[in-house]
Image (cartoon, rainbow, N blue to C red):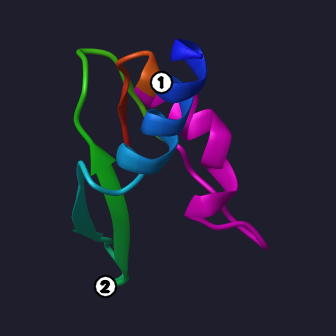
Amino acid sequence: MQRLLLILFLAFSSFNSFADEVHFKTNDNATIFAEFHKRGTHAILLAHGAIFNKQSWGKFEQQLLGNNYTVL
């Protein structure tokens, strides 16, 4: 039961509530927006393209955050 509560807590609380929105200007003047989840000392960059978006990483992102990774 405790494990289920932990999973639910991570799924609902860490997805957006602790994220900072950041943006980067590229050389060709495009602006890239991202969510930055600051956690531990190891960081992972989750990139997407084509038909995917930031929500495509869903469960994997939550697993990384649950294991104390910083995620962009």
Taking the magenta stretch, the answer to whether it contains residue 53 is yes
Taking the magenta stretch, the answer to whether it contains residue 67 is no
Amino acid type of the residue tagged 2 in the rendering: Asn
Closer to us: mark 1 or mark 2? 1
Q: Is residue 25 above or below residue 66?
A: below
Residue 31 picture quarter: bottom left
Disc 1 residue crowd, few under 14, some 14–19, many 20+, Cα 10 Å: few
Q: Is residue 57 above or below residue 69?
A: below
Residue on which the image places disc 1? 6
Residue 43 picture quarter: top left
Q: Residue furthest front?
A: 1
Image quarter (top left, top right, bottom left or bottom right) of the C terminus:
top left
Residue on which the image places disc 2? 29
Helix, strand or loop for disc 2:
loop
Residue 35 picture quarter: bottom left
- The part of the chain drawn in magenta is 46-65
Which residue does the image show at 25% across and 27% down from the upper left?
Answer: 39
Helix, strand or loop for disc 1:
helix
Q: Position of residue 45 (x, y in %)?
A: 46, 39
Instruction: Give whichever of discs 1 and 2 has the lower sequence position.
Output: 1
Which residue does the image show at 78% across and 73% down from the upper left?
Answer: 51
Q: Position of residue 53 (x, y in %)?
A: 63, 67
